[in-house]
Amino acid sequence: MGIHRTSLAISQHKCRSGAEPLVMLTAYDAPSAKMADEAGADVILVGDSVAMVVLGHNDTMQVTIAEMAHHTAAVARSNPEALVVADMPWLSYHISPADTVANAAKLVRSGAQAVKLEGGSERVPMIEAIVSAQIPVMGHLGLTPQSMLAQGGYRIQGRNSEAALAMVADAKALAHAGCFAIVLEGMPAAVARMITGATDVPTIGIGAGPDCDGQVLVFHDVLGIETNLRPRFVRRYASQYQDGVQALAQFAADVRRGDFPSAQESYEMHPEEQMALGLYGS
């Protein structure tokens, strides 16, 4: 800690060079960003998962570029030492390179130091356009949630050799186009290991086994704030949902019993001022 991370520093962070694995966590507001940064995260991802874990949608495809900019700004205001990467939401990079750059610029103006988008070789023109605009880009391969309609839902990708080799080719194409890192999601560990060995930029896994150059999980999953059924790759380190409900229920009980607020939690007037109002001794 002590030095703000940069996309250039992250791009050189390959474990085969002796570096420790990268740590990436999602965050969606200033408090969660401060927690992730103080915990030592190298990268904070303002993920489009905000649609589900914060905004209450059923999938990530409902969040807009304006909402992503809003949450990115909140994270950036915490001034973390971690690199702030913002997800480009669905349809913000699908129409044209010019439209893609304009949307990426909105996230950068909100405080992002880099953007992330999903997809393989078909995204190369968009990636090259963003990189040409001097905006660092992180790629994302495998199970790409914004492609859930085309992929038939949230399904593990690369289970056969043909699909695995196609993803290796896609990873090379993304790196060649200028991505400084690539997220690998929802694929067999062996495939992620192949991709990691075949590319010179770091890979960050989520449901992709232990051989990536780093790992990422969703803030709410790590802390046990999210109560929905969790994927097998999520390891929960706390149970803050249950702890929070218990604390709030205790507050409600104290209020209903008249135990809150106590005298120590209340403000009083000077006795002479109370007497002037006719309140002293009442």
Image (spheres, rainbow, N blue to C red):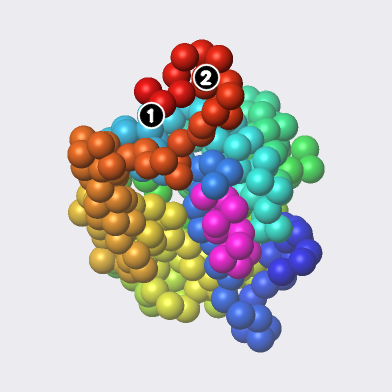
Q: Over which residues does the magenta segment extend?
A: 32-46
Q: Nearer the viewer, mark 2 or mark 1?
A: 2
Q: How many marks?
A: 2
Mark 2 to mark 1 CA distance (whole Å) = 60 Å
Residue 35 among magenta residues: yes
Q: Residues within 10 Å of mark 2 (few under 14, many from 20)?
A: few
Q: Residues within 10 Å of mark 1 (few under 14, many from 20)?
A: some
Q: Amino acid at mark 2?
A: Met
Q: Are marks 2 and 1 in contact (CB under 8 Å)?
A: no
Q: Quadrant of residue 232?
A: bottom left
Query: What number is the disc on residue 250?
Result: none
Q: Quadrant of residue 30?
A: top right
Looking at the image, which residue is at 55% across and 57% down?
Answer: 35
Tell me if I can see residue 36 in this picture.
yes
Lateral position of residue 186 relative to residue 129, left or right: left
Q: Element under label 2?
A: helix
Residue 3 among magenta residues: no
Lateral position of residue 275 relative to residue 226, left or right: right
Residue 230's spot in the image, x, y percent?
25, 57
Q: Name the one closer to the observer, 231 or 256.
A: 256
Q: Name the one closer to the observer, 208 or 161.
A: 208
Looking at the image, which residue is at 50% across and 73% down?
Answer: 212
Looking at the image, which residue is at 73% across and 43% down?
Answer: 135
Which quadrant is home to the N terminus? bottom right
Q: Element under label 1?
A: helix
Q: Amino acid at mark 1?
A: Gln
Residue that mark 1 sits on: 62
Looking at the image, which residue is at 55% across and 58% down?
Answer: 36
Tell me if I can see residue 95 in this picture.
no
Lateral position of residue 52 relative to residue 48, left or right: left
Residue that mark 2 sits on: 275
Residue 76's spot in the image, x, y percent?
66, 42
